[in-house]
Image (cartoon, rainbow, N blue to C red):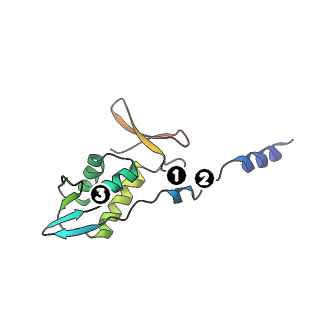
């Protein structure tokens, strides 16, 4: 068997990971205005879907939106200022790109790891270990 045959055989047995992210749908943010506060109603269900801590996502949203906020007793994010659903969705997409999706294989099967104080993204699908900015 020559190299080309072996390569063809290997490619046939390699799982197709393209499109596998279809199983990973981030819920659209449900936001409403309450005075000068934007209430992110489904914040906790979103963070659970992402598999990330509420506080980590909240800090990112505050930084990305340039605002302050807190998580109320009902698990909703309350962000100071008026932010539409689209703007919150854009910030959430940035979070997913930076802290959820593996930069190597593109799958969302990642967990945080700390190594020498640095926050790393460990992919449970391909085994990649990638640095994050946070």
Label 2 or label 3, whichever comes before in sequence order: 2
Label 2 or label 1, whichever comes before in sequence order: 2
Residue positioned most to the left: 35
Q: Is residue 21 left or right of residue 77?
A: right
Q: Nearer the viewer, mark 2 or mark 1?
A: 2
Mark 3 and mark 1 in contact? Answer it, CB < 8 Å. no
Q: Is residue 121 left or right of residue 72?
A: right
Label 3 or label 1, whichever comes before in sequence order: 3
Q: Nearer the viewer, mark 2 or mark 3?
A: 3
Q: How many marks?
A: 3
Q: Check residue 43 in the rendering and tell me which mark sits there, or answer none.
A: 3
Mark 2 and mark 1 in contact? Answer it, CB < 8 Å. yes
Q: Could you tell me how far apart the alpha carbons at marks 3 and 1 are, in whole angstroms?
A: 24 Å
| Label 1 sits on residue | 106
Dot 1 falls on a residue whose secondary structure is loop
- Please tell me which residue lies in front, 74 or 55: 74
Q: Position of residue 19 (x, y in %)?
A: 57, 59
Q: Is residue 20 above or below residue 81?
A: above
| Label 2 sits on residue | 17
Task: Identify the residue at image location x=12%, y=69%.
Answer: 35
User: Alpha-carbon neighbours of circle 1 within 10 Å: few (<14), some, or many (≥20)?
Assistant: some
Q: Is residue 24 left or right of residue 118?
A: right
Q: Position of residue 16 (x, y in %)?
A: 64, 53
User: Which quarter of the picture shows residue 78?
Assistant: bottom left
Residue positioned most to the right: 1
């Amino acid at each position: 068997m020559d190299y080309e045959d072996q390569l063809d055989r290997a490619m046939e047995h390699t799982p197709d990971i393209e499109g596998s992210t279809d199983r990973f749908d981030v819920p659209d943010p449900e936001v409403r205005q309450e005075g000068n506060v934007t209430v992110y109603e489904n914040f906790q269900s979103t963070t659970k879907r992402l598999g990330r801590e509420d506080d980590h996502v909240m800090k990112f949203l505050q930084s990305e939106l340039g605002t302050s906020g807190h998580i109320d007793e009902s698990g909703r994010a309350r962000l100071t200022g008026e932010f539409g659903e689209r703007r919150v969705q854009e910030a959430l997409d940035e979070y997913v790109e930076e802290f959820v999706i593996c930069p190597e294989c593109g799958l969302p099967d990642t967990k945080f790891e700390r190594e020498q104080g640095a926050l790393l993204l460990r992919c449970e699908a391909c085994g990649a270990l990638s640095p994050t900015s946070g």
